[in-house]
Amino acid sequence: MSESTIRLVSLYPTLLGTYGDGGNVLALKHRARLHGLEVEVYDVDPGGAVPHDADLYVLGGGEDTAQVAAANALRADGGLSAAANRGAAVLAICAGYQLLGESFPDATGSPAPGVGLLDIWTDRLPQRAVGELATNPNSGTGVDLDLTLTGYENHAGATHLGKDATPLAKVLAGSGTGDGTEGAVSGRVIGTYLHGPCLARNPELADRLLGWISGRQLETITEAAVEDLRRERLATVLDR
């Protein structure tokens, strides 16, 4: 592996891999190839040590019991926190997003401790959020994308942001966080409820993550099949 190779860690894909979230790793590999970047992927299963020295860490969604188990394991291991604190990028989806915060509901609805990488906490929405989700990214987050994000949500969490977290986007259609915003950003840590998979539907977000890591301003590369998918999905919820 060369020094220019991006080291990508897929965290607990057997616990946190619902709704096709493993596709985010595939999307990152694909977009990296388009930009002439090399990627080495490491799958870390429960019980395995989380590398401290990787460039990008990806977490997906999962059920309540799996979410608690993943949070407990990540806190005990410490590798993800150490990596994020030295500037590694993190993308966390749904349950993975919630567990990066201070607390989230377990299967009984009681607060379970999170990893503490994001200044957020989660409790329950009055009604489960299910369906297509469309959002406009906020400026000033470091993500700064000039496009509508598309995905679908399936969660019961109302996530609240503290002063050290910034909303990723404003909701155009769907529920998101529950207050008109969606997701959270702090430094190079991004959390979102967007399934789809998120990076397959929103490849520019994958490019932003890869750009952070590589230190390059990546050119815009448009793929017709992706644009067709985006138009079709956004048309189901937005008047376009």
Image: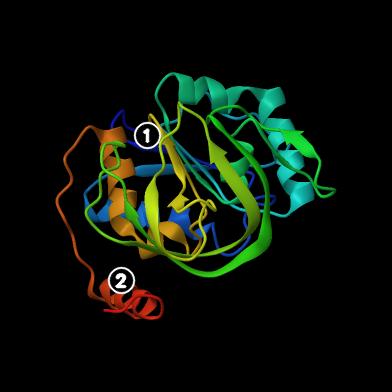
* Above or below: residue 207 compared with residue 216: below
Answer above or below: position of 167 versus 146.
above
Give me the residue at 26% from left, 36% from top: 140
* Residue at x-position 31% and y-position 79%: 239
Q: Position of residue 22 (x, y in %)?
A: 54, 57
Q: Which residue is mark 1?
A: 1
Q: Type of residue at label 1?
A: Met
Tag on residue 180? none
In primary-sequence order, the first of circles 1 and 2 is 1
Q: Residue at x 41, y 28 (%)?
A: 88
**Residue bearing the label numbered 2:** 226
Q: Where residue 12 sits in the image (x, y, percent)? A: 64, 44
Q: Is residue 190 visible?
A: yes
Residue found at x 66% / y 31%: 74
Q: Nearer the viewer, residue 81 or 127?
A: 127
Viewer-closest of 208 and 79: 208
